[in-house]
Amino acid sequence: GTNPSHNAMTIREPQRNTTDRIVLAHEKDLILIVDAVDTSVIPQEVRNKARFLYADIPAAYPYDARSWDEKMRYCYRLISQYKNYAKVVITSRIHVGLPAAALGTPVIFISKNGWLPGGHERTGRVAGLLDVFHRVDEVRGLPWTFGNLEDPVPPNPGNHYADRFRASFWNRLKRNEYYADAAKLFGRIPLQRLGAGMHRSEIQNKFHFIMQPSDLLHWQQRRAVESILFHHPNAKVYVHVDIDLGPLDWGDFGVFMESGYDVQVLRLNRNELIKEARHIVRGRIHENDSTLLAGMLVYKHGGVFLAKNIYAIRELSAFLNAGYTKDTVGNITMMVGEQSSVEV
C-alpha cells in the first residue's frame, strides 16, 4: 500500500480504459461505473466520459490474479479510485456502494425492477442499506435526475444514517480493549463523520443539559442526548455537570465524542451563574429554582435548554426562538432563547 506506483494505477478491463496508469488528479473528477445492472438509464453523455470498472476481477485482467497479493492489489486499486479520483460512483453492488460512501464519495445506486448483480432485493440482503445512497429505479418512480454530472454531485442522502450505524458499531467494538487501543493508536478515533458538513440552518443547532455526575453513567440520560443527535446530528450539545470539585468523568458519554459528534461535557459553575444572575435579574433570586440556571445558560450561550429526562421526537425549528415550558410541579423542561436576550 506504500508503493506510489499503486496509487497511480487503474484497473485493466476488457473493453475500455485499459491503461494501467492514470495521472494523479488535482481534483476528484472521474465518473466511475462499476457493475451497473442497467446502463440504459444513464445518459449517453455520462457513459461516454465514464470509466467502467468491475468489482470482480475480469477475465481479461492482464496480471496473474490467482495470488492473494494480486487480489489485494486489485482491491486496493479499486478503493483508491473511489477515494482519490471519483467525483461519483455509479453501481448496483452493495460491496461497491458502501465502501465508496464510507470514503465520502457520492454514490448513485441503480436497480432494475429490484434486480441486483447478487440477486433480487427482496431476499433481504440489502434491507436498510440502500437508504444510504442516491437511487435510480424507474420501476419505483426514481428516475435519473443528475443531468450530465458536470456539476458536483450532492452528498449521499443517508450520510447521517450511516453515521449512526458507525457510532453503534464503535460502541460495541470499543468493549474489546484490543480493538479500541488499535483504533486510537492509528488515529481512527474520533470518527470522521460523513454528515459533518451537511448543516441545516432551519433547525436548532445548540442544546444544553444540566446533569449530575451519576447521570453520565445512566442510560436514560444518554438516550436523551441520542434523541437530540438523531434529529440534529450536527448540533453542538453541551452537558453541564453540576460538580464543584473532583475529576470530571465523561462516563458513557465519551462514545458521542469518539463517534465524531459535537458533544461537550463541561463543569457547571453554579455560584458564578448565580452571581451573574444577580446583576441581570431584578428582584429576589431563588437559587434552587430550575428556571434560574436554565435561563442563565441560555442567556450566556443561546440555544435550547432541555431537562435531562426530555427526549426529542422530531426536529426543533430554528424559528422557535423564545419561550419555555414547565412540568406539573413547576420544574423547567425546555427553554429556548437567543444569546443575551433571555429574560430570566
Image (tube, rainbow, N blue to C red):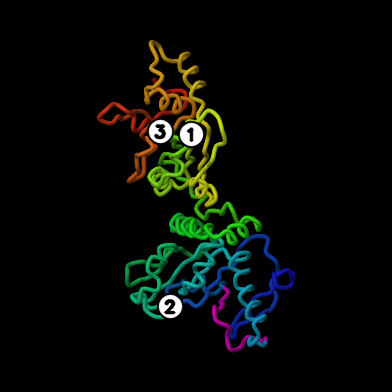
Q: Are marks 3 and 2 in contact (CB under 8 Å)?
A: no
Q: Is residue 265 above or below residue 54?
A: above
| Mark found first going from the N terminus, 1 or 2 | 2
- Give residue 38's mark: 2
Q: Residues within 10 Å of mark 1 (few under 14, many from 20)?
A: many
Q: Nearest to the eye among marks 3 and 2: give it.
A: 3
Which residue does the image show at 37% across and 35% down from the upper left?
Answer: 307
| Mark found first going from the N terminus, 1 or 3 | 1
Q: Taking 212 as reference, is 323 left or right?
A: left
Is residue 197 shown to the viewer in this render?
A: no
Q: Give the magenta range.
A: 51-63
Q: Is residue 19 above or below residue 143?
A: below
Q: Secondary structure at mark 3?
A: strand
Q: Please provide percent x and percent y for residue 332.
A: 34, 29
Q: Viewer-proximal residue, 278 or 13? A: 278
**Residue at numbered disc 1:** 241
